Image (cartoon, grey):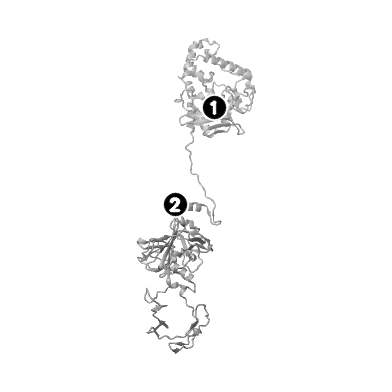
Amino acid sequence: MIIAAGSTSVSINVYFVDDDGGTAPGEPTTGLLFSDIETGGSASYQRQGAARVDFTLITRTVAEAYSAGGFILIDDTNMPGLYRLDIPDAALASGVDYVMIQLVAASGNNSIMRPIQIDIAGWLDTSDRVDVGSWLGGAIPAQGVTGVPEVDVTHHTAGLAPSPATTGVPDVNTVEFLDTAVVLSNGLPDINVEDWLGTIVTATTAGRPNVNISALDDSTNAAAVLSDMLKDGVVGTADSGTSTTIVDSARTEANDRWNGSMIVITSGASAGQARIITDFVASSDTITFAPAVTTNLNTETYVIIPQAGVDLQSWLGTESTMVAPSALTSSGEVDVNVTELGGVVQSLTDLKDFADDGYNPATNKVTGVLLVDTTTTNTDLVTAAVTAAAVWDLDATSHQTGGTFGQAIGDPGANAETMYDAVVTDAAGTNVSADVIVVKTTVDAIETDTGNIQSRIPTALVNSRMDSTIDATGFEAAAVDLIWDETMAGHSTSDTSGLVMNEWQNGGRLDLILDAVETNTQDIQSRIPSALVSGAMDSDVSGWNGTSVATPTVAGVPEVDITHIEGATTLSELTGVPSATPTLSEALMILYMSLRNSLSTTETLKSVTNDAGTVVMKATLSDDGTTFVKAEFINGP
């Protein structure tokens, strides 16, 4: 960029791109504010041979007049990354050949701006202009183009000028230039220019004069923009390379110097392909670019265009002559092959597998994925064997709810009239005879209440008996079978059902009680009337209240067909938990409902329902790993 020395109120455009930490490295940075640089960053200029000078940024609008340090984005949508900057006048003062301008954004913005060098040209001072009104005593005619005098050449080196073959273009036959004969190449004169507007012409490359162009098509701004874009560009030849890299030992610039610039291959099979430089490693002279060119590079020539931005034609696929790949599909969608998610390859693989399982090409959607539960066995369920063992070993002391199995087994502390009291507490048998008398009285009462029970048995029953088959299925059936088939050995914990049953076995306390009874009754056989069969109390009952007794299925065990209990032929469902002293029908019904109806057991609650499925009794459950406790049943739900 060239600006006349001493220029004032100069505004230029600067270009920001995302750095390696940004969301799109090398792409234009949008939305920057002056505060993003002023706070945590810096704005500086450095004149030739002088120290850096910091200057303050202020916000402006695009159309506002110049104000030193003014900074504003131009158009985020149509000109992303481009910002206006008002240069302080002191930076452009005469006395030096150039000044460097640098803006550094705060680190959190992840954005960089390439430094700009402004050449300060003293020869551009326009104060020395001469307005020519006449030439050699003759008036200058009006110009066809403002500022360009029209000259009608009639003579050249004292010779008459011939009529031009093309109107307005004089035919000049140059035979000599600066006392040197003119040599033609392809019809064009070879001219060795030694001086131009009073300045000696120099050539960095032989035969190519160094020309400093200050305007393009009368536009100094166009020349300045082109200079800003290209003056720091380079031309080079690769030493080696691949389809995405070039190694050139001539590249001695600083690390990342060319990041974001455009590289154009100018020779070989990939000639004309332009790519964006994504990285420059100074230590290895390696330029990395993307996307890849069509062939591996070796010794091709190339040019680097700084601040080139993005190859939009190749990206958008709008230029048919651009070399593949195009980044868009024919429908305008971005064609991207993603290989990672969050830097993890497996994450993307898992997502792809998920989508493939349910992808429907017809709708271009993932329609669903079948989730399979591979669990086949729940090892947390309690087995029937464990349940049976727990029932027989359970201490019945805390299970004395009226009408329950626990109450029937009993606890002397809660009820003295229990099986436990008779078998365990009264081990000496002092109450057994009294109990036998009570049983006799109760049987007589049952006979009186039922009358001739055989006559009331429906003939439809099997052999006039109340035989029935209870079908227990599932877990309940297995639990019942295991409970009744469980060996009693080992189940003798105090106050448990297992202890009571053990006492009824031969050699148990019941056996001792019976021995005591025999001793106390003093050879009861001798007191039996001789009329009895063989002097024993055995009898063969052939009738009951005048009705013949049916032949027993099991020898010696009379069959009784009960049609009434407590005067009723059917039992009503319970609506709640019976009292501690239930009636016979209540005691039977609670067992019946527990076996027949729905029984729900969770980790903390056991519930019994009526036939309609309504919970009528429930008990809380707990298990601390050592002791399983079922609380007393209470009314539901």
For label 2, the SS is: helix
Q: Which is more toward the observer, 162 or 629?
A: 162
Mark 2 sits on what residue? Answer: 346
At label 2, the amino acid type is: Gln
Q: Relative to 146, is 293 on the left or the right?
A: left
For label 1, the SS is: loop
Q: Quadrant of residue 176?
A: bottom left
Q: Quadrant of the C terminus?
A: top right
Q: Which is more toward the observer, 446 or 235?
A: 235
Q: Position of residue 151 (x, y in %)?
A: 49, 83
Q: Which mark is drawn over residue 632?
A: 1
Q: Are marks 1 and 2 in contact (CB under 8 Å)?
A: no
| Label 1, residues with CA under 10 Å away: few <14, some 14-19, many ≥20 | some
Residue at position x 48%, y 39% from top?
377
- Indicate whether 342 appears above or below 628: below
| Label 2, residues with CA under 10 Å away: few <14, some 14-19, many ≥20 | few
Q: CA distance from mark 1 to mark 2?
A: 56 Å
- Indicate whether 429 appears above or below 321: above
At label 1, the amino acid type is: Glu
